[in-house]
Image (tube, grey):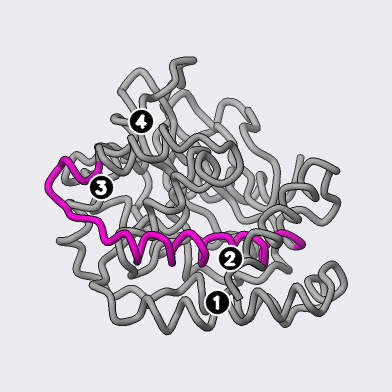
């Protein structure tokens, strides 16, 4: 059994929860494992990665607790373990309630409305979050040797210019607590409805950032403007106006962030992933 999973077992036992299974639901930089009928642990297995300690998990856990208290459409934290980030045997982790996924696909309206519901609740989240954190962090990521080995110098310079420009242009916008990585993969259709999860990238930014994240693939990889537009319209129909110029800048910033992280998230990328990366970089090249 992997040391990260053993650490999660020990941590849960320290709170009187005895695991009776070990069903691995995800095995990557973060391991997701179901330990009981109701308990799921998320553990950072990449202890040498760019995020050390519990800072990011602490933000995620605090936001998830706030969202859960206000009945937002999110996967809830587990009620039997303190709602905080935990460190056990050198591994950062937190604990969640298991939910049953269904095979249904959410409609664009459901996606837009559920994201707006989360944003509404997060307007009352009063713990400080760093402004545009993922953009600043991505600039630092570009300096890592693994990224410099994987990307040509011209591509690194392109990403740095876009990240710098995006920070400058988005900093004056109204900022609030955001999901930070609100793509379709972090949405789960369950027997309790459509739920958001994985709040690890949370930061303060314009709401258009989360919208750009959720429509990016549909709009710019799949040429599905109808779906992308329907998500944005559903969000706006809930009463929050969207600045199209800010949304466009967030689409650019999102592409730069995703590209900067690619060598870390996918050290041995498939040809399909390399093609997607090249598509993003070529698309970004049109704007500078």
What's the mark number on residue 118?
A: 3
Q: Position of residue 182 (x, y in %)?
A: 43, 49
Local SS, label 3: helix
> What is the magenta range?
235-263
C-alpha distance separating marks 2 and 3: 23 Å
- The quadrant in which residue 285 appears is bottom right
What's the mark number on residue 163?
A: 1
Q: Position of residue 88 (x, y in %)?
A: 58, 59
Residue lying farthest top? 103
Say which label, 4 or 2, has the lower sequence index: 4
Q: Nearer the viewer, residue 267 or 226?
A: 226
Magenta-span inclusion, residue 236? yes
C-alpha distance separating marks 3 and 4: 16 Å
Q: Position of residue 130 (x, y in %)?
A: 38, 77
Q: Do residues under tags 1 and 3 come within 8 Å of each other at their CB atoms? A: no
Query: Few, some or many C-alpha atoms within 10 Å of disc 4 (few <14, some 14-19, many ≥20)?
Result: many
Q: Do residues under tags 2 and 3 come within 8 Å of each other at their CB atoms? A: no
């Amino acid at each position: 059994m992997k040391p990260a999973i053993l650490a999660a077992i020990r941590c849960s036992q320290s709170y009187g929860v005895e695991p009776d299974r070990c069903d691995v639901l995800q095995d990557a930089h973060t391991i997701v494992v179901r330990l009981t009928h109701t308990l799921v642990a998320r553990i950072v297995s990449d202890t040498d990665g760019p995020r050390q300690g519990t800072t990011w998990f602490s933000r995620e856990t605090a936001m998830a607790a706030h969202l859960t208290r206000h009945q937002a459409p999110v996967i809830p934290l587990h009620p039997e373990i303190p709602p905080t980030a935990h460190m056990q045997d050198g591994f950062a982790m937190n604990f969640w309630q298991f939910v049953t996924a269904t095979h249904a696909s959410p409609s664009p309206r459901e996606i837009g409305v559920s994201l707006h519901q989360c944003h509404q609740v997060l307007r009352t989240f009063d713990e400080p979050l760093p402004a545009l954190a993922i953009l600043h962090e991505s600039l630092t990521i570009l300096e890592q040797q693994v990224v410099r080995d994987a990307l040509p110098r011209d591509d690194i310079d392109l990403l740095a210019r876009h990240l710098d420009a995006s920070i400058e242009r988005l900093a004056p916008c109204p900022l609030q607590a955001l999901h930070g990585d609100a793509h379709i993969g972090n949405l789960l259709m369950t027997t309790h409805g459509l739920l958001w999860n994985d709040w690890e990238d949370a930061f303060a930014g314009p709401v258009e950032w989360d919208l750009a994240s959720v429509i990016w693939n549909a709009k710019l990889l799949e040429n599905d403007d109808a779906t992308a537009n329907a998500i944005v319209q559903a969000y706006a129909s809930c009463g929050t106006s969207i600045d199209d110029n800010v949304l466009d800048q967030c689409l650019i910033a999102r592409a730069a962030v995703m590209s900067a992280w690619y060598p870390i998230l996918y050290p041995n990328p498939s040809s399909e992933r390399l093609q997607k990366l090249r598509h993003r970089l070529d698309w970004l090249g049109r704007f500078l």
